[in-house]
Amino acid sequence: MNRLNIAGLALALMVGGPGLADSHGHKKHSHGIMKKMGQTMEGLTVKGGWARASTPGAKNAAAYVTIMNHGMKSDALIGVASDVSAKVELHSHKNDSGVMRMRQIVSVPVPAHTVAELKPGGDHIMLMGLKRPLKAGDHIMLRLSFQSGATETLKFMVMKKGGATKKKHNH
């Protein structure tokens, strides 16, 4: 898929509503958390994307995804874009003398024949400066960019803490 097709696909996804499109622009409908997206240019598969619902008044939220590299070359997630926040960064939790601290990272490596899991307590996507609250049951679109030039636009389901969509009483 060339960059022109990728740009057209991204535009079709933004304009075309909740359906996803394949490399020819044909709509695919998403069911559950996220429909299996298939292969990108460099043998990457992404699945299981979800974002944590924001608390009232929160300006930031986190999103998570699993990236599988079936290819022969290493790759890395180097950027994410979204229209739900002013800024998107890749972050990780690091132990700093016994205190867990969140830090921005440049990339998330995805070596050949491995899986990179962005998950709570580890590497994750930070949505900073939310333009609207993220409510459980909603969906957001994120565009992942890789070092190889591959991109994938994904539909992420918004879920409560821990990945559950059920409403719980919070203290």
Image (cartoon, rainbow, N blue to C red):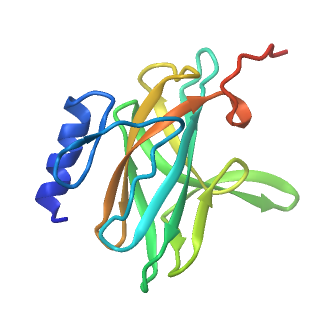
Image quarter (top left, top right, bottom left or bottom right) of the C terminus: top right
Residue lying farthest to the bottom in this orientation: 72
Residue lying farthest to the right in this orientation: 98
| Residue at (52, 72) in percent of width and height | 110
Marker count (numbered): 0
Instruction: Estimate the x, y position of residue 104 in percent, counting from the top left.
Output: 56, 55
| Residue at (41, 63) in percent of width and height | 78
Q: Is residue 37 above or below residue 130?
A: below
Could you say which quadrant of the image residue 51 lies in?
top right
Could you say which quadrant of the image residue 117 lies in?
bottom right
Q: Is residue 107 above or below residue 122?
A: below
Image quarter (top left, top right, bottom left or bottom right) of the N terminus: bottom left
Could you say which quadrant of the image residue 13 lies in?
top left
| Residue at (55, 40) in percent of width and height | 50
| Residue at (77, 17) in percent of width and height | 168
Instruction: Estimate the x, y position of residue 150 in percent, counting from the top left.
Output: 31, 65
From the viewer's perspective, tell me whether residue 79 is left or right of residue 161.
left
Instruction: Estimate the x, y position of residue 89 in percent, counting from the top left.
Output: 48, 49
From the viewer's perspective, tell me whether residue 81 is left or right of residue 47.
left
From the viewer's perspective, tell me whether residue 139 is left or right of residue 169.
left
